[in-house]
Image (tube, rainbow, N blue to C red):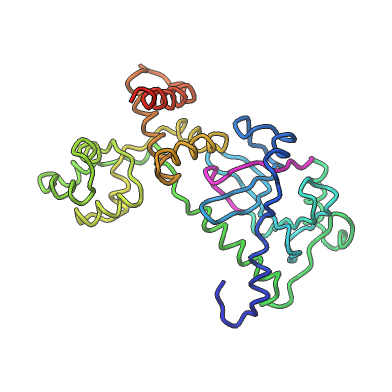
Amino acid sequence: MSDPGVPQRFLDLVRRSRPRPDLAERGIVERLGPSEDAVLEAGQVWRARWERTVVLLLVTEVGDLAVQAAPLTVDPPAEDSESVVVDSALTALGVEVTVWLGLVSEVPLRVLERQVDSWSEDLISRVSAAARSPEDHATGDVRAGRAIEDDHAPDALVRAELADELDTLREVPGLPVETSDVNYRPLASLLGSKIDLKALREALRLPQPDVMQIVRGKFPLTPELVEKISRATGLTTAVVARSTKPLPLGLVVLVEHPRWRPVLAKRAKALDVDEMSGRLSAGYGTFALATRETGGGEPDWEGRLRAFLLSETSGAEHR
């Protein structure tokens, strides 16, 4: 959004379209309960966040690793012909809300941070009705949005900004997931006799045991590590990224669910790593623990994750 032909006042309006910061956690907890108890359902409004990108989302459908959702804006007033505008009295947000139904898209669970509202079935039905028959819902407390007539109008800029932010959220890397049709090949297999452990260790600046785990495909690879390994080996980043053993779907679903995000974000901060790196290490640490402690059958992933986090806490207390 840096078009030099766009007046600065319009750009300022777009920047104000971020979700309002006055949705206090205390009030949210009183209405919806703590984050740790969150159960994802259609009709909920969530704050999605990754780094500096923040978007309010109305969930329309819930899947294992993603939701279908429509972005919302609350300030400044903005709309288009595919949106629906909801009066301030009908939601807990306390201001007029625009539901951008033309921008409904799949958003990964891992970016959902906090539920901030829950809309009734009646309100969802009224929003759907306004979208289906805009000519019959031109006015009222749930009305169809009005068309944008100027591509440089604030409404158009808000919509473009939302589209960019949704792209950013969709591109946030997730944990590698085990599937029946994808086989991973560790670096040891990819490089064979060409592998240079000394060069890898110097490039990665990691202890020898960690480098050996990477070579065997048993160490979580962050994008930074993928880039370094690619430069050191000559392999493409795509090939390197697929050289780590992927995690079982059940474990990934758990670790990427938003109810675990506060705990894992706090852990990442304590380890002085970014959130994605922290989530990777928690996922692989839990997987390693389950591999050591279970026989056949699907492990109790939640129990294993709790045990892994407790083992870290106990270990820190005894160091």
Residue found at the far bottom of this picture: 5
- Relative vertical location of residue 126 with respect to residue 295 in this rendering, above or below: below
Camera-nearest residue between 289 and 239:
289
Q: Which corner quadrant of the image does residue 12 belong to?
A: bottom right
- Residue ID at (63%, 36%): 40
Q: Which residues are magenta?
A: 105-120
- Relative vertical location of residue 40 with respect to residue 108 in this rendering, above or below: above
Image coordinates for residue 313, horizontal then vertical, percent: 42, 26
Q: Quadrant of the C terminus?
A: top left
Q: In the rendered structure, does residue 108 fall within the stretch colored magenta?
A: yes
- Relative vertical location of residue 310 with respect to residue 29 in this rendering, above or below: above
- Residue ID at (40%, 44%): 273
Q: Is residue 122 toward the left or the right of residue 246 in the image?
A: right
Q: Which corner quadrant of the image does residue 38 belong to?
A: top right
Q: How many marks?
A: 0
Q: Main secondary structure of the magenta part?
A: strand
Image coordinates for residue 9, horizontal then vertical, percent: 68, 75
Q: Which corner quadrant of the image does residue 43 belong to?
A: top right
Image coordinates for residue 144, horizontal then vertical, percent: 81, 60
Q: Is residue 241 toward the left or the right of residue 4 in the image?
A: left
Camera-nearest residue between 185 and 57:
57
Q: Quadrant of the N terminus?
A: bottom right
Image coordinates for residue 24, horizontal then vertical, percent: 70, 44
- Residue ID at (66%, 51%): 56
Q: In the rendered structure, does residue 23 fall within the stretch colored magenta?
A: no
- Residue ID at (28%, 50%): 239
